[in-house]
Amino acid sequence: MRLLAIWLVNALALLALPYLMHTVTVDSLGTALLVALVLGFANTVLRPALLLLTLPVTVISMGLFIFVINGLLFWGVASMVDGFHVAGFWSAVGGALLYSVISWTLSTLLLQKS
């Protein structure tokens, strides 16, 4: 049940993103649900492998290269899912950062245990 709630919170964060960044668009709630699912899968499967492969660059940049990896995953999902558009790479980096802040805030507010 908690996994479903987190999925819905991430979809809500994706729906809020175009109101804060005009370079990211999400067409509908269904698109946001699909993007949240694909992005969650990409972050679960691809991100650890990418972090391991780019570990030397990440260490040299003192961890800042992780923002690039997050942006690439965000941009990649945007190119795979119809109805979800990101204007460019730097928009994807900013969108991924803002998306993570929004989803963390929403999950903290809505899913905290009493």
Image: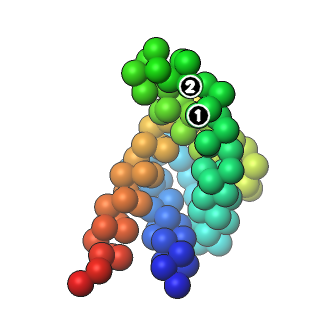
Q: Which residue is mark 2?
A: 55
Residue type, label 2: Leu
Residue type, label 1: Leu
* Tag 2 secondary structure: helix
Q: Does residue 45 appear left or right of residue 57 in this picture? A: right
| Residue 108 drawn above or below residue 91 | below
Instruction: Specify how the rendered protein is coloured.
Output: rainbow
Q: Which residue is mark 1?
A: 51
| Residue 16 drawn above or below residue 25 | below
Q: Quadrant of residue 73?
A: top right
Q: Residue at x 60, y 58 (%)?
A: 40
**Residue 87 in view (yes/no):** no
Q: Position of residue 87 (x, y in %)?
A: 59, 37
Q: Residue at x 41, y 60 (%)?
A: 103
Q: Nearer the viewer, residue 101 or 12?
A: 101
Judged from this view, the residue extending furthest toward the top is 60
- Residue count near mark 2 (Cα–Cα under 10 Å), binned few <14, some 14–19, many ≥20: some
Q: Residue at x 60, y 50 (%)?
A: 43
**Residue 11 in view (yes/no):** yes
Q: Quadrant of residue 54?
A: top right
